[in-house]
Each structure stands twice: as structure tokens, then as C-alpha cells.
Image (cartoon, helix red, strand yellow):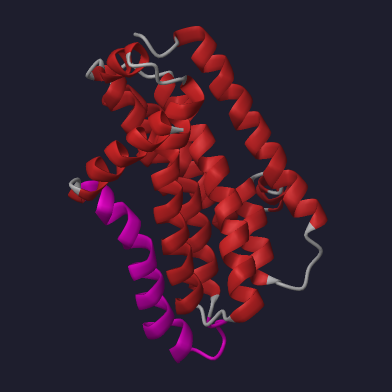
């Protein structure tokens, strides 16, 4: 685990000194807060937490995915992975190290989302827990994209469309029944549904979120076997 810890520290330093990445993490909760205070709470026809639900799903679907895909692609582009492999860092240690810090930051942001939406106690724990599972799925997909990309430009061209689909399909599904039937199988849709109705059964949604994670993990394994970490 020393190797994973070293990669974790490296990723922490890279993110903290990158303003563009930090903006991605604070943008969604800021937007949720503004829309909640200025729109939702001033309109009796709009639920107070509607924007928190919307932006939480968008954040989970976009930010971890893009962050880790760019991080891995940057390491590939700079040939950093070659030195990490030579130093004895194993693939799973690398992914855990890079994704670990991204996950921790995501959990912190999820707590802020919950507080903005007025979630407390069990409801807050459920929001953060479900959001964390979604962030893990997003990280796995981003890792698959990053390992498949030789540079940041390629990673961005692949990650951005995937992130936009995951982020906006729950919103689009509200206006089209066909999209809604498809969106049902996306983890971002399930996260929004759970947050919107905390009393609903979690069995089905958790299975779908887990299935998403398994598919994304399989994509990463396939991409890794095809490209490796040494290129």
C-alpha cells in the first residue's frame, strides 16, 4: 500500500495546485446554492431541494470522471507511468492512489450538497453514501478513458461527451418518455431518484448502480490489457 499512498499524495498535490480542476469541484455546489436560495425557496411551486438533486447527479457524473481521465492521460503523456511501473507500482495501486483522493474530495462536496439541500441525519448519510457509489462508478469509467488515451486532448475528447450524457440524461428524461426508459439504466438517474425520494426501496437502484460500476471496471480492465501502463 506504500505505492498507492505515494500516488495518492502525488495526485493530491496535482489537484490542489490546479485551479481549473478545483473550479470543477466547487462550481456545482455553488450553482446549487444560488439556484436554491434565489429560485427554489422563492417559488412555492418548486421543491426546495430540486436543484440540489439536479446538480448532485450532474457533479457525480461529470467531475470525478473528467478529473481522473485527465490525470491518467497526463501521466501517460509525460511518461510518468513508465517510471511508476519501474518503481514497482502495480496497476491497482496506481488506480487506487489516483482515484482515492478524487473520491475523498467528491465525498466532501457531497456533504456540502446535502447541507445546501437541508438534508440532516440519516437523509444526509444516505445522500452521501449513494453519491459516493456513483462517484466510484464515475471514477472507474474515467480510469478506462484515461488509460485508453495517450494524451490529455484525447482523454478530453472521450471523457467530455460521456460526462455530458451522464450529467444531463436525468434532466432530459423528465421531458421525454423514450429517454426516461433509457436513463433508468444510468447510475446518475438512479442517484437523482433516490435523493428525491429517500423512502423508496434501494434494492433496484443499488443493483443498477453496481451494474454500472462492474461494466466500467470491465472497460478499464480491457483498456489496461490493451494498452498497459508502460506506453
Q: Residue at x 47, y 35 (%)?
A: 96
Relative to 97, is 218 above or below? above
Point out residue 124 in the picture as x, y percentages from the top left corner: 58, 73
Magenta stretch: residue 34 in it?
Answer: yes
Q: For this view, does 117 lie left or right of residue 6? A: right
When the figure is inspected, residue 40 is found, relative to residue 11, above or below; the finding is below
Q: Answer with left or right where residue 58 lies relative to residue 215.
A: left
Residue 73 lies, in percent from the top left, at 33, 24
Q: 218 or 108: nearer the eye? A: 108
Name which quarter of the figure residue 66 lies in. top left
Nearer to the camera, 48 or 191: 191
- Inspect this view and state whether residue 175 appears: no
**Which of 222/94 is in front?**
94
Does any portion of residue 24 appear in the rendered image? yes
Q: Position of residue 21 (x, y in %)?
A: 27, 47
Q: Which of 173 and 85 is in front in this view?
A: 85
Q: Residue at x 35, y 27 (%)?
A: 72
Residue at 45%, 9% in the rendered image: 227
Where is the C terminus found, in terms of image quarters?
top left
Horizontal side of 65 relative to 77 (left or right) equals right
Residue under the point 60% across and 50% down = 133
Range shown magenta: 20-48
Q: In this view, does 80 lie above or below 131?
A: above
Height in image: 36 above or below 165? below
Q: How many labels does the image show?
A: 0
Q: Is residue 164 magenta?
A: no
Overall secondary structure of the magenta stretch?
Answer: helix
Task: Determine the image quadrant of residue 174.
Answer: bottom right
Residue 57 point in image, percent of width and height: 53, 57
Residue reaching furthest to the front: 2
Amino acid at each position: 500500500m506504500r505505492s498507492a499512498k505515494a500516488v495518492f499524495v502525488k495526485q493530491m498535490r496535482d489537484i490542489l495546485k490546479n485551479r481549473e480542476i478545483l473550479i470543477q469541484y466547487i462550481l456545482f455546489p455553488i450553482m446549487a446554492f444560488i439556484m436554491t436560495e434565489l429560485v427554489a425557496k422563492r417559488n412555492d411551486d418548486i421543491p426546495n431541494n430540486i436543484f440540489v438533486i439536479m446538480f448532485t447527479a450532474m457533479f457525480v457524473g461529470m467531475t470525478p470522471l473528467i478529473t481522473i481521465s485527465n490525470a491518467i492521460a497526463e501521466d501517460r503523456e509525460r511518461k510518468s507511468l513508465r517510471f511508476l511501473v519501474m518503481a514497482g507500482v502495480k496497476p491497482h495501486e496506481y488506480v487506487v492512489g489516483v482515484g482515492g483522493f478524487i473520491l475523498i474530495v467528491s465525498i466532501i462536496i457531497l456533504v456540502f450538497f446535502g447541507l445546501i439541500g437541508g438534508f440532516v441525519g440519516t437523509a444526509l448519510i444516505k445522500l452521501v453514501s449513494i453519491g459516493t457509489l456513483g462517484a466510484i462508478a464515475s471514477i472507474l469509467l474515467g480510469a478506462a478513458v484515461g488509460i485508453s488515451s495517450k494524451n490529455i486532448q484525447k482523454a478530453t475528447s472521450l471523457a467530455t461527451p460521456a460526462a455530458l450524457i451522464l450529467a444531463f440524461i436525468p434532466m432530459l428524461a423528465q421531458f421525454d418518455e423514450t429517454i426516461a426508459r433509457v436513463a433508468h439504466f444510468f447510475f446518475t438517474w438512479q442517484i437523482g431518484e433516490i435523493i428525491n425520494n429517500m423512502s423508496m426501496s434501494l434494492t433496484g437502484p443499488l443493483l443498477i448502480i453496481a451494474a454500472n460500476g462492474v461494466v466500467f471496471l470491465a472497460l478499464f480492465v480491457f483498456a489496461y490489457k490493451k494498452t498497459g501502463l508502460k506506453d
